């Protein structure tokens, strides 16, 4: 397949640049067919690299003097901070110098920058964020979790198609079960958008649609692809993360509460660690933004090195499987209208 080149936003997220740089170094050590360009303030990146052992011929630094902060208005930030790590990283993908861009920075700026600088695959209405989550039966794709708060039925249908293709091609789930996030299994349940989308999904060829799924059933792996708007998806994702952190904290407290529990902890710890690792979101990397002309992966704002590493490594398989080509072929995408293309060009200018 050859070398895969990934641009990494070294300044994005709560733990930048230290954990970002550490994750990049770990990825380089794990993958011989990987080349990384760290984008950000050069001195800060060099400082984080001090004492690290890494293949210098496969790690580059691109200086970017500006940083887009989490609270900044995304459109303004992308248009005014052209020397930021997000803008310069995305431009490396646009120019073809890099195959993918990974960031733990602003979701809004990543979303706007991805659409403005890279553009959408022709025929894709809206690109969604699609993280893979753990469940008791294996990985589950949640689509959308942060890009389109008010999605239309036609867009949700495309999310279902892209999610199904992604799970089968990248994750390896055969004939993935696709379900619509809802407040109940009964036909009369759901808001207007859900009620309008359900019949469309039932008629969509090429997906294994199984109906509605309630949020409590996502953790039990009752579907492989969960389709929803970004408002619903983000609520599911954040509840997932918060519940996991709370339970882990309570387990640790209980195991340390008495002498007897401490002795018991020594006996069960190997099995417990193995089980908890299965449910660690960091194992699955970041959330790819599907449907763009190039791969953009958004990892958590508080991502540590291990999650950054997995987010980078998933880009290798993306290139190998040529997922965008699969979207075009299997979804029978057609060119967007001349007006749509012209509007996109005006936005870029």
Image (cartoon, grey):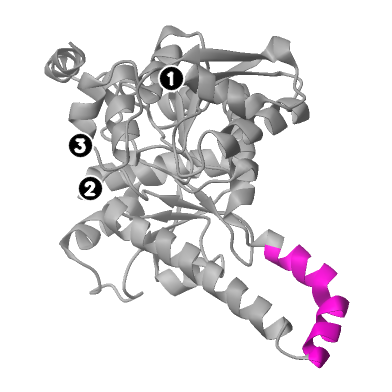
Q: Which residue is mark 1?
A: 89
Please tell me whether the stretch drawn in magenta is mainly helix, strand or loop: helix
Question: Where residue 177 is drawn, which disc sits there?
Answer: none
Quadrant where the image shows the N terminus: top right
Judging from the image, what secondary structure is the residue with disc 2 in? loop
Q: Residue at x 65, y 81 (%)?
A: 253
Q: Which residue is mark 2?
A: 151
In the foreground, 232 or 35: 35
Q: Is residue 189 above or below residue 328?
A: below
Q: Position of residue 240 (x, y in %)?
A: 48, 65
Mark 2: give few (<14), some (14-19) or many (20+) Cα within 10 Å. Answer: some
Q: Position of residue 56 (x, y in %)?
A: 72, 13
Find the magenta span and give its range. Answer: 259-276
| Distance from the alpha carbon under mark 2 to that under mark 3 | 21 Å
Question: Where residue 73 is drawn, which disc sits there?
Answer: 3
| Distance from the alpha carbon under mark 1 to that under mark 2 | 28 Å
Side (left or right) of 226 relative to 345: right
Q: Is residue 322 visible?
A: no
| Distance from the alpha carbon under mark 1 to that under mark 3 | 19 Å
Mark 1: give few (<14), some (14-19) or many (20+) Cα within 10 Å. Answer: many
Q: Residue at x 77, y 64 (%)?
A: 274
Q: Which of marks 3 and 1 precedes in the sequence?
A: 3
Q: Which of marks 3 and 2 precedes in the sequence?
A: 3
Q: Nearer the viewer, mark 2 or mark 3?
A: 3
Quadrant where the image shows the C terminus: top left
Q: Nearer the viewer, mark 1 or mark 2?
A: 1
Q: Is residue 98 above or below residue 146?
A: above
Quarter of image, res 255: bottom right
């Amino acid at each position: 397949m050859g070398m895969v080149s990934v641009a990494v936003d070294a300044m994005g997220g709560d733990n930048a640049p230290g954990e970002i740089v550490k994750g990049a170094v770990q990825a380089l050590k794990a993958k011989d067919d990987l080349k990384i360009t760290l984008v950000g303030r050069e001195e800060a990146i060099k400082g984080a690299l001090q004492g690290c052992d890494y293949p210098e011929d496969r790690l580059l630094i691109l200086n970017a003097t500006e940083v887009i902060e989490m609270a900044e208005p995304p459109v303004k930030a992308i248009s005014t901070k052209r020397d930021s790590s997000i803008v310069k990283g995305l431009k490396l993908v646009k120019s073809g110098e890099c195959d993918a861009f990974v960031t733990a920075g602003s979701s809004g700026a990543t979303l706007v920058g991805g659409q403005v600088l890279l553009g959408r695959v022709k025929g894709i209405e809206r690109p969604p964020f699609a993280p893979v989550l753990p469940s008791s039966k294996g990985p589950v794709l949640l689509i959308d979790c942060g890009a389109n708060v008010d999605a239309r039925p036609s867009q949700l249908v495309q999310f279902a198609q892209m999610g199904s293709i992604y799970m089968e091609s990248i994750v390896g789930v055969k004939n993935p079960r696709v379900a619509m996030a809802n407040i109940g299994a009964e036909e009369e349940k759901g808001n207007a958008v859900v009620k309008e989308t359900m019949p469309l999904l039932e008629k969509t060829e090429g997906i294994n649609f199984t109906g509605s799924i309630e949020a409590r059933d996502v953790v039990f792996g009752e579907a492989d692809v969960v389709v929803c708007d970004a408002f619903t998806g983000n609520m599911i994702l954040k509840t997932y993360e918060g519940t996991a952190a709370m339970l882990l904290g309570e387990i640790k407290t209980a195991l340390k509460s008495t002498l007897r529990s401490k002795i018991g902890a020594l006996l069960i710890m190997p099995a417990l660690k193995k089980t908890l690792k299965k449910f660690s979101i960091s194992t699955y990397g970041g959330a790819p933004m599907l449907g763009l002309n190039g791969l953009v992966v958004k990892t958590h704002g508080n991502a540590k090195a291990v999650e950054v590493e997995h987010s980078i490594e998933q880009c290798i398989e993306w290139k190998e499987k040529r997922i965008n080509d699969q979207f075009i072929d299997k979804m029978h995408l057609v060119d967007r209208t001349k007006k749509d293309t012209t509007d996109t060009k005006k936005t870029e200018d």
